[in-house]
Image (cartoon, rainbow, N blue to C red):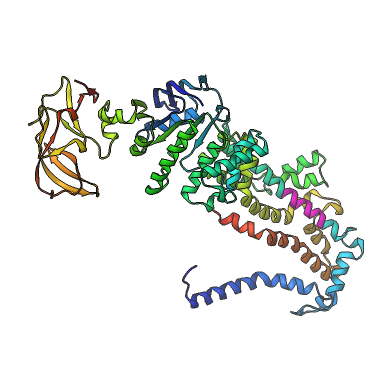
Amino acid sequence: MATVDLKDVRKVYAGNVEAVKGVSIDIADGALCVLVGPSGCGKSTLLRMVAGLETITGGTVSIDGKVVNEIGPAERDIAMVFQNYALYPHMKVYDNMAYGLRNRGTPKDEIDRRVREAAETLELAHLLDRRPRELSGGQRQRVAMGRAIVRKPKVFLFDEPLSNLDAKLRGQMRVEIKNLQRSLGVTSVYVTHDQLEAMTLADTLVVMNAGVVEQAGAPLDIYEKPASTFVASFIGAPPMNMIPAGGDGHPEALAGAQTLGFRPEDARISTPAGEGGLTLAAVVEAVEPVGAESFLYCAAEGQHLVVRVAGRSGANIGDKLTVTTPREKLHWFDKAGRRVSA
Amino acid sequence: MIGLSRRRGVIAHIVLIIGMLVVAFPIYYTFVASTHSLQTILRPPLPLLPGPEIFNNYYEALFGGIGRIGGVNVWTLLFNTTVMALSIAVGKIIISILSAYAIVFFRFPFRMTFFWLIFITLMLPVEVRIMPTYAVMVNLGLIDTYTGLTLPLMASATATLLFRQFFLTIPGELIEAARIDGAGPWRFFKDILMPLSRTNIAALFVILFIYGWTQYLWPLLMTNRNDMTTIVIGLKKMISFADADTQWHLVMVTAMLAIIPPILVVLFMQRWFVRGLIETEK
């Protein structure tokens, strides 16, 4: 059990490319922290610095209160699950899981006990004699997990571990990872570019963009109060609608606010907006029924909007609608894209 | 080759069979000659079928008089050649896998310079640098030794390059996983790199063994004593200028004997050899 603390961590690659520009995050003991952001935002680099696979240009990384900047990956007492699983192709499943323990000189019967225990937990017991290439993607993923848990490390690191699985399996593994992490109570850092994965897994969600932390906090807090237009459009699918503030039917803007945002599910059709709410005249451009809900893609004031309606929608392409949003569901952002609060 | 029509199959086979005949006939003829008496060989035409002297000839070549090839029997020559071919093959593999390991996985000053130095030697075959190499060996007193016979032929740019290309295809994540699993450089080499290189090593072994076995110029220069020379040189020495003095039937037997070990190596390692050449799965 351990905490992970990053203090002003920076990474500059040769040629002065600054990949991580001063990131500070405190991860509580036993918490699952998800780093999310678009490709190239520095989230993987940050994770690899925690793992010890990248040198740290500036700042400190501490595990369990001890600065580990100069300590090699094997001595940091971490385990990592890679995107492509990185299983040793020539070793059987059993040996894949046992390899790290053998290198540490763990006694043979202890290794055996731990591997079988992990295999039991992950339902891999019948596959211990197979080689990785004889396994399906999901099974390989489990072996990679098994290799991490037999070590009983202080910290788990996940580098986009589900991105090579199909959608159904991904959902299933997501739940399993969450349950496993909770039952083992091991502090974890999880990197993903999938905001749904990020929302559902995280105890602490860290949204990164261009090498800096845009916002960190509980997933629903971030969803409800995004700190910037970037976070607002990155978290949530479909993304938040944004329009320039001050148009017809707009409520009075907050001081300094330039952009007005509202989530697709907060928009209403043909319902009075109420005091201080937003009212827009929109034209339906496309209808996307997905079963339990439908998405209406509309145009209003030269902007494209998405409105979520429950169940089947009677709207057709070309229909004129009145889209409204109550005042308490509106988000305001200033010129720089930062959130403006009342 | 899926969906080949029957006619194309027949044509392909005819071409293959003709090719086979062109390659195999001289070897077959050598075999035929090795089964006849010297008189039959010297009196043309040589029969196309094996003759009655097969057991006599082979017995004489293998167990006959000691002084047959300048005072040395064929076993010594086969032994020398085996030592040479094995040392060259194993030595080349060890040296090149280690140098490729260093060049691919370690960051050290002048890494690329070293790589290019190795690469450049590809353009210099043994024959080009044979005089300076010979001079060095003479000065070191290595004439008529196994060391002198094998050492200069061990460094191999080709094998280094082959291993380098293979190592470059090993995914970075695998290396990182090994680092996190606590595998240091030696363990990584021994536990992960070597097992993954198995098929490449087997394929190289076959090629290099044959390369070592068929060396001609270098053993010709390096050996003065007949008991240190190789079977290929021995064969050459068995043929004297006066045609009538040459024991042609024994020359043919010795040639057959010289072919057998490389064939055995290929046969035994064929499975690995083919896999090493075609395998892409990592």
Residue A284: x %, y % from top left: 13, 45
Residue that extends furthest to the front in the rendered view of this protein: A183
Q: In the image, is residue A149 above or below residue B223?
A: above
Residue B114 magenta:
no
Quadrant of the rendered structure where residue A268 is?
Answer: top left
Front residue of this view, candidates A342 and A291: A291
Q: Which residue is drawn at 62% across and 52% down?
A: B199
Residue B84 magenta:
yes
Front residue of this view, candidates A185 and A146: A185
Q: Give the range drawn in magenta.
A: B78-88
Quadrant of the rendered structure where residue A245 is?
Answer: top left
**Direction from residue B117 to residue B47 in the image, left or right:** right
Q: In the image, is residue A329 above or below residue A308?
A: above
Residue A110: x %, y % from top left: 64, 37
Main SS type for the magenta part?
Answer: helix
Q: Which residue is drawn at 14% across and 31% down?
A: A326
Q: Can residue A36 be seen in this view?
A: yes
Q: In the image, is residue B244 above or below residue A130?
A: below
Quadrant of the rendered structure where residue A6 is?
Answer: top left
